[in-house]
Every structure is written in structure tokens, then in C-alpha cells.
Amino acid sequence: MRLLAIDGSGLVASIAIVEDDILLGEYTTGYKKTHSQTLLPMIDEVTRMLELDIDTVDAIAVAAGPGSFTGLRIASATAKGIGLALDKPIISVPTVDALAYNIWGCHDVICPIMDARRGQVYTGLYTFSEKNNFEIIKEQCAIGFEEIAQCINEVGKPVVFLGDGVPVFENQIKDLIKADYSFAPAGFNRQRASAVAVLGQRMYDAGLFENADDHRPEYLRLSQAERERQEKGL
Amino acid sequence: MISNDVKILAIESSCDETAAAVVVNGRDVKSNVISTQIPLHTLYGGVVPEIASRKHTERINQVVKEALAKADTSLDEIDAIAVTYGPGLVGALLVGVAEAKAIAFAKKKPLVGVHHIEGHISANYIENKDLKPPFLCLVVSGGHTHLVHVKDYGKYEILGRTRDDAAGEAFDKVARAIGLGYPGGPKIEQKAKEGNPEAIHFTRPKVDDGIYDFSFSGLKSAVLNYLNKAQMTGAEVSEADVAASFQKAVIDSLVDHAAMAIDEFGMDKFAIAGGVASNQTLRAAFEKMCESKDVEFYHPSPILCTDNAAMIGAAGYYEYIAGHRDSWDLNAVPNLKLGER
């Protein structure tokens, strides 16, 4: 089975083509260009390099959120357009799960943090069991850093941090985390579409995919206007 | 049989309508599907960009599919994909742009980025098969007020534009001030029918250093001042008279500018376009002015005045036959200038 994977959830843009257990091609850029200028040209480049017709992919895995609202939508609309044109299903992979999957086989607690602004992070807690099964300790969510720090301290095991929230919350990590902690290095600490593809394959096998028409990002947050309206009790 | 017809799938998502259409040779509309979000934004008194962008993402595939189905065609029979890439709300534009690019890429079809205003102008080609440039066109909508000299297909000179609020924006703001709600254009037009357009004289806005430029924020302030003053003195306010007098002030300003340009450029064809162009009182005023100058007057049906994709298919066709193609890095350009690529 051949999967196209797309991740536009953060500053990094990443696309990959994975066939069964082989990564055929992956293209990841961390540059100031918008995802509108990077994602599709990268897919075009990789498919040309692989001499692969896009029609031969069986499904599209997309990092569906949380993340930058605009970035998620560019990735989703790209997946939806390809899905519509070629009648392929979409697999909506949770962004934070895919980030954690970057450090496959890690027995420490894995804590991806993405800067969600307004003092919050998109985060979750994960680990790999002794037999390297992927385990979710705390599902992806949008919460204050203090809250996730408390969860980490309660688990009380060594933790590895990754994600674009690390530089932003470095001081809070230093101040609040009581367990031993480390930081994932380059190549492991940002979104990579190959991880989205691998998790996507597992979800597909479990029947967790949808028609491209029905796919929409999972923002984990209302828009500001909706939130303010809700706060007014309307 | 080999056909020389050019069949374009067009996509438009620059504001609060998710739209797709199939248009043949720029003038023959096979389908024109519009999924409007107006009821959703009415809750907030105006378009909320983030909500608009989310809705576009949810609706886009269904809208494109419906456009293909209504045209009784498939992507395989489409010659090119045209999409609005500006101006507009950046988040909203990006959804249509990403979708159009992905479809074009997957089906190996040429991609043509279209300017939203060029689309509005081109809406006139659809129902007026004889209309060809050169002509003058006034584009009036919630986001735009442009007086344009259409020199040729794809060749434009902007003679005048608004210095502040767009005409439709002024309608929205005044409608809110007199409690009519959103969207203001149709609400003011309706209310104005019961009022006297000569009841209150609001000063006609003028711009000193650009004879064809418009300004509507002063007019809006004049209405607000009138309402405040009436409230302080306890005078009774006729909403209908305010609506009618305000509407007349806007229309007078638009008609005067257009008439001046028609005279200066010696034009024999004049067109209106954009959401506000479906205002019947405005149409009648332009019709009268054009008749007095023996100028042919063109205007699209209301369904082609509102944001739609058929107009993008019309404009896209002329860009396509002129050889314009865009690459996979086409981006949304929220402040795209008319005539620039």
C-alpha cells in the first residue's frame, strides 16, 4: 500500500511517500515560505524524482491538527483536492501523536509541545512500551504549560521534549519539570511526514479513514469570534 | 470529433461564498454553484475571516463536485482550472488556491490564477455575448469600489478607487447604525423604498486630488452625526428617509464619477459589476445616465453580481487563451492589484 503524507501544522513543511514499510521519499523544509508555496511543489518534486504517478497512491495521510490554523487548512485542502481528483480516501492523523512517533522506540515519556499562543501549548504525553508498542499517556490537547508540567511530574519518569514550543517554553521547563529531561535533536524534533505516514498506515488498517469530501482539520479550538460569543453566554 | 472548446473549472473562495463553476469559452456557463455563509456571519454582524476559512475547507469538495455534476461533466473533460488568488481574505483565498492547485496537479491540468475584480468585470461577458473591450466598468462591492477602463481582455487601467470604505462597506455600516443588521446592502435598499431620498441632504463625498477617486467614510460619518444629533435633541428619525437619502448620496457620487469618465474617454459602452451592482435603484440611475449620453449600458444578473465562480471561469478563459499559466507555488495575494500578475 502506498501513502502520500502531508504535514503543514507547524513552521516546518513536510511531505512523504511511504510504501508498506519503506520510505520512498520525504521532503522537509523549515523555511519562511508559506505552506502554499512549499507543500505542492515538494510533492511534485518528490513524485518526479521517484518517477511515480500521483494516481498510484492509495490514500492520503494528513496531519489534521492541532496546529497553525492556516497551515492545517493548506495541508487539508491540498489533500482534499488530490482526494477529490483521484477518488482517494484521507486519513486524519493527530498532529501531536505524529510528532511523538518521530522518536520511535523511546522508553522515556515523550512530550511534544507546540506553541499555541495565548499562554497555551498543543501537547500530549506518549511512550513506547518495552515491546515498542506506541502508548498514549495523555491525548493531544490545548492546555497551559503548567498543566502539562504537573502531569509530567505526576508520571515521575524521565521525559524527552520536542516541537517548536521547546525554545518558547525553555525557561518554564527548567523551572517546573522535576523529572530528568532531555531534548530531541534536529531530525527528530519537528514535524516529519514519514511519521504521519506510518501512523496513518496503522489508522488505515484499523479502518480509521474518511472520504476526502468529509475531511476537515481538527483545530482543538474555536475561532476567537466564536469563543467570545460563547463567553458572553450567547 | 475534436472540439476546440475550452472548458474551465473555476473556484472562488475569497470571502464568504464557497463557489465553483464550469464555463465553456468564457461565456457559456454550464454550472454555477454557490454555497453561501451569510447566515453564519450574520450572528457576528459581518464576515469573520477564521470562520469563513473553516467553512470553505468543509464545503469545498462538495461544491466542486456539484459544479461538475450540474455541468454533466468530469475532471477528465476539463481543459484548465481557474482560481481566485486575490484580492480577498488571505485565509479564505488559501483554501480555494490549495484545492485548485491540488486538483490541477493530480489531473495534470493547467492552472490559471484569476484576479477577483477581473472576475467581477468579466461577469458582464456571460449574459452579453456582444460585449467586447474597450469599455468602462464600475466595480462596486463590499470590499471594492473601482472605476476601471477595460482596454482589452486582461488589460485594465484603474481610473479611480475608494480612498477609504468601499461602497458596500458603507452600506453595511449605515445599516448597522440604523439597526437594520447585516448584510447592509439589501436591507438598506429595501428600507429606502419606503423613504424619501430628498428628505436629508448628506454632503456628496469628494476627493480633491483624484477626480475619479471615491470616499465614503465621510458620508458614513455624516449619517452617524445626523443620528446622534437627532438622539440628543429628541427629534424623531425616519429610518426609511435616512436609508433612502444615504443610498441616493452614494449613487449620485458613483454616477457622477462614471459620467465624467464616459465623457473624458469618449466611451460608448459602460458596465457595472460587483455585489452592490444588484441594487435596483443604482441600476436605474446608471441606466438613465447612460441613456442620456447614448451609451450602451451593461449589467450582470444579481446571481452573477454576488461573488461567484462563473465570473472567474469567464476571466480565466481570457487569461488562458492569452497563455497565462501558474505554477504549483501559486500563493494567495490578499492585496493583489488589478492588472498585475
Image: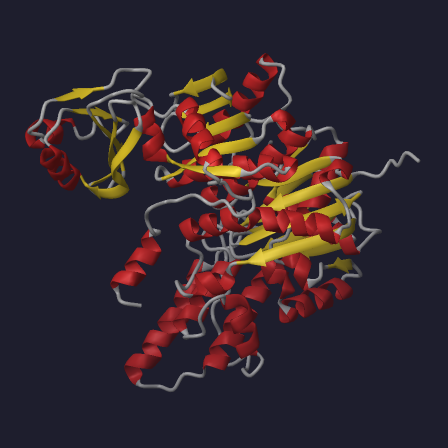
From the viewer's perspective, is residue B224 above or below residue B25? below
From the viewer's perspective, is residue B225 above or below residue A203? below
Regarding residue B289, the answer to whether it shows in the image is: yes
Q: How many marks?
A: 0
Is residue B136 found left or right of A93 in the rendered image?
right
Seen at 52% across and 48% down, the residue is A214
Q: Quadrant of residue B296?
A: bottom right
- Nearest the eye: A207 or A65: A207
Seen at 48% across and 37% down, the residue is A91
From the viewer's perspective, is residue A189 above or below residue B226? above
Seen at 36% across and 34% down, the residue is A95
Q: Position of residue B121 (x, y in %)?
A: 67, 49
Seen at 72% across and 51% down, the residue is B69
Q: Position of residue A177 (x, y in %)?
A: 9, 30
Q: Position of residue B173 (x, y in %)?
A: 43, 64
Regarding residue B121, the answer to whether it shows in the image is: no
Is residue B152 found left or right of A187 in the rendered image?
right
Outermost residue on the top side: it is A49
Image quarter hosting the C terminus of chain B: top right
From the viewer's perspective, is residue B127 above or below residue A38? below
Q: How is the image coloured?
A: secondary structure
- Nearest the eye: B327 or A155: A155
- Nearest the eye: A221 or B39: A221
Is residue B28 found left or right of B264 in the rendered image?
right
Image quarter hosting the N terminus of chain B: top right
Q: Position of residue B284 (x, y in %)?
A: 69, 70
- Nearest the eye: A76 or B251: A76
